Every structure is written in structure tokens, then in C-alpha cells.
């Protein structure tokens, strides 16, 4: 019996995910060119995947548990349970407009073209506010969209805001605050649940010791 964990293969969550396991006393060989690795001292198999695919894999029980940003989790809207916030990968999903614009509230967005990699979350926000706008989904370099005339507004992930600033944009409204979370499949067997409980106990101890 092993617990299968999906983590990001590279990118911003990879190192912190592996470090968390290490802090829990679980060593995993680095998987940069590997899809899968077996931990040495815990019944754990680690799968290295694109973060976008992690919610689906956990819903399908290809992996029992996963580490992913809340932003991706909400956007993918899959049927999984959130187990625990992990305190890293902190960022926010925000609207940004060209520096010279005056934005007082979300009614500014009415009738605008919005570029984003998060069409589902963005649309939900607009719907709640009763705003009609045109959403253009783009998968990367969203902050370039206004300067090339593709959009009036962007809805993008921000941590420091420097990328926006360098592209002549300013952050005007945050719609989601996000961090990495541990998720699990909804139908875990009791043996996997026991392993998860053991892992979770260690994660909580590690996080408590750090605070
Ligand atoms: P992949 O190749 O796995 O699809 P990616 O390019 O989609 O990677 P990364 O840029 O590595 O993703 O970001 C992974 C996650 O890190 C984000 O979904 C988010 O939860 C978190 N994150 C933290 N800070 C930032 C930031 N400033 N910009 C983007 N993502 C951030
Ligand atoms: Zn991704």
C-alpha cells in the first residue's frame, strides 16, 4: 500500500513542495526528468506533473493527494477535498489596468475586454457583480495583452506587482488570495486515509514549529 502524491514538476511550487516533504522527514529524489519517484522512508510515490493537471488527476484517483495553488484548484473546479493550507505559493489574482486609467470600482469593467488565464474565476466574479465583459483566455504573458491591443484589462496572478508595473499596468482589485493547498481524492480508502493522517500529522508539526 502506498500513498500517491502529485506535485508540480517544475515552476514555483516545486521546490517548496519537495522541501515540505523533506521537513517531514521524507526524502524524494529530484524528478526534473522523471515523472515519478518513490520516497525512501515513507510509503509515498510522488508524481511530477503540470500544476494545471493536478486537480483532475486527484479527482480521478490517479493520485490520492496533491499539492496545488488554490487559484488552479478553483479555476479547474474539480470534485476534490481541500485538506490543509500549506503557507507557501502565496499570490493573488487581481485586475490590472493601464497606469493612466481611473478605476474606482468594478463597474469600470462593464463592456471591457479582459485578458486572463483564469476565465472561470473571472467570469464568476463578473457574474456576482452583474457585469458584462468580454473575456479572452490566454495561457501566458497575460500582462502584454493591453500593450498589443488585445485587451483593455488583465486579470492575472500577482505577487510583488513588478511585472505589471514594467508593463505599464497597475493593480486595481484583488478577486482571490491564494496559497498552495493539500488536496485529496473524495473516495480515499481507509488505508490511504491512515497514511494521509500520518503525513498530515507531520505537516502540521512542521508548520507549527516554523511559526
Ligand atoms: P506549469 O508548467 O506547471 O503549468 P505554470 O507556469 O502554470 O507551471 P507557475 O508560474 O510555476 O505555473 O506557478 C505555479 C503556481 O505558483 C501558481 O498557480 C500560483 O499558485 C503560485 N504562484 C505564487 N506566486 C506567483 C506569481 N507571482 N505568479 C504566478 N504564480 C504564482
Ligand atoms: Zn500551469
Image: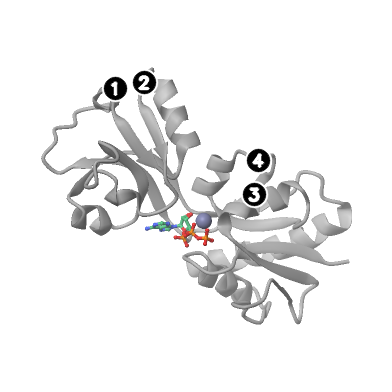
Q: Which residue is mark 1?
A: 110
- Return the disc, 3 or 1, that comes first in the chain's sequence: 3
Disc 2 secondary structure class:
loop
Q: CA distance from mark 2 to mark 3?
A: 29 Å
Residue 99 or 199: which is nearer the viewer? 99
Q: Looking at the picture, how far across and down is residue 13, in whole percent?
A: 51, 64
Residue 162 drawn at (x, y percent): 24, 58
Mark nearest the camera among 2 and 4 is: 2
Q: Residue at x 36, y 20 (%)?
A: 132
Q: State the residue at coordinates (29%, 46%).
A: 145
Query: To which residue does mark 2 refer?
Result: 132
**Disc number lying in front (4 or 1):** 1
Q: Is residue 64 left or right of residue 17?
A: right
Comes first in the chain, label 4 or label 3: 3
Kindly give the residue lying farthest to the left in the view shown: 100
Q: Cα distance, mark 3 to mark 1? A: 32 Å
Q: Position of residue 25 (x, y in %)?
A: 66, 78
Residue farthest along the top direction in this orientation: 130
Q: Where residue 53 appears, x then y in whole percent? A: 62, 53
Is residue 170 among what the camera can see?
A: yes
Circles 1 and 2 in contact, beta carbons < 8 Å: yes
Asked if 13 appears above or below 104 in the picture, the reply is below
The residue wearing badge 4 is 78
**Mark found first going from the N terminus, 2 or 4:** 4
**17 versus 135 height, above or below:** below
Which sits in the foreground, 139 or 96?
139
Label 4 crowd (10 A; few <14 / some 14-19 / many >=20): some
Query: In whole angstroms, how far apart are the C-alphas of marks 2 and 4?
Result: 25 Å
Amino acid at each position: 500500500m502506498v500513498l500517491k502524491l502529485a506535485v508540480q514538476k517544475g515552476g514555483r511550487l516545486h521546490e517548496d513542495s519537495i522541501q515540505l516533504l523533506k521537513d517531514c522527514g521524507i526524502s524524494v529524489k529530484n524528478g526534473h526528468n522523471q515523472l515519478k519517484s518513490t520516497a525512501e522512508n515513507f510509503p509515498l510515490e510522488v508524481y511530477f506533473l503540470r500544476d494545471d493537471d493536478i486537480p483532475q488527476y486527484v479527482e480521478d484517483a490517479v493520485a490520492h493527494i496533491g499539492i496545488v495553488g488554490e487559484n488552479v484548484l478553483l479555476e479547474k473546479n474539480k470534485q476534490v477535498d481541500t485538506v490543509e493550507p500549506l503557507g507557501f505559493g502565496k499570490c493573488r489574482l487581481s485586475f490590472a489596468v493601464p497606469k493612466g486609467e481611473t478605476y474606482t470600482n468594478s463597474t469600470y469593467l462593464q463592456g471591457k475586454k479582459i485578458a486572463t488565464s483564469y476565465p472561470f474565476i473571472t467570469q464568476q466574479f463578473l457574474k456576482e457583480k452583474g457585469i458584462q465583459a468580454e473575456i479572452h483566455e490566454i495561457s501566458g504573458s497575460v500582462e502584454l495583452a493591453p500593450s498589443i491591443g488585445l485587451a483593455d484589462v488583465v486579470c492575472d496572478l500577482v505577487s510583488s506587482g513588478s511585472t505589471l508595473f514594467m508593463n505599464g499596468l497597475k493593480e486595481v482589485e484583488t478577486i482571490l488570495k491564494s496559497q498552495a493547498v493539500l488536496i485529496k481524492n473524495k473516495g480515499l480508502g481507509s488505508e490511504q486515509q491512515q497514511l494521509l493522517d500520518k503525513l498530515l500529522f507531520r505537516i502540521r508539526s512542521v508548520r507549527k514549529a516554523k511559526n
